Amino acid sequence: MGVRARGLVTSVVLLLCAGPCLADQLVDPATVAPEYRAAAEKRRAEQLKVQSCQHRATEQKVPVRDRAAFVAACLDGSSAANEQR
C-alpha cells in the first residue's frame, strides 16, 4: 500500500470515528457565564424535551421515515404523537 493510499484510508477512518464525538452535548447552565445562564437553562429544557420525544419514538418503534414528524408532533404536544402505534 502506497503512502497516498494509506493516508486516504487513515483519513476515512478518522472521519467515520469523528461522528459520535460531534453530537450535541446537553448544555450545563452551571458552566455558562451568568449573563447567559437563563438562555442556557432554556436550551437545556428544550434538549431534554427533544430527547424525551426521541426516546418515546424509539419505544413505540416509529419507522425512520416517520420519526421527524413524530418528534415534531410530540414537541407540539399533539395527541397524534401520544397515541400508541
Image (cartoon, rainbow, N blue to C red):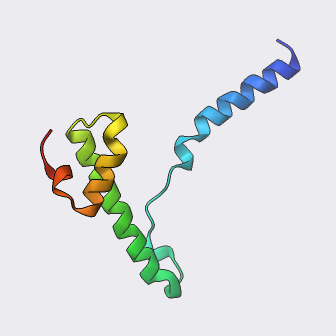
Quarter location, residue 58: top left
Q: In screen coordinates, is 44 left or right of 14?
A: left
Counting from the top left corner in percent of width and height, residue 23 is at: 51, 49
- Residue 70: image x %, image y %? 28, 48
Task: Give above or below for 7 relative to 22.
Answer: above
Q: Position of residue 75 (x, y in %)?
A: 29, 60
In the rendered image, which quarter is residue 8 located in? Answer: top right
**Farthest residue, direction right:** 3
Q: Residue at x 69, y 29 (%)?
A: 12
- Decide: is 63 above or below 1: below
Q: 67 or 28: which is nearer to us?
A: 67
Residue sitting at x 80%, y 26%: 7
Name the quadrant of the C terminus: top left
Q: Position of residue 14 (x, y in %)?
A: 67, 34
- For the N terminus, which image quadrant? top right
Give the side of residue 38 with respect to residue 52, left or right: right
Q: Is residue 53 left or right of residue 14?
A: left
Residue at the image point whose x is 42% and y is 70% from the top = 43
The residue under the point 45% across, 66% down is 27
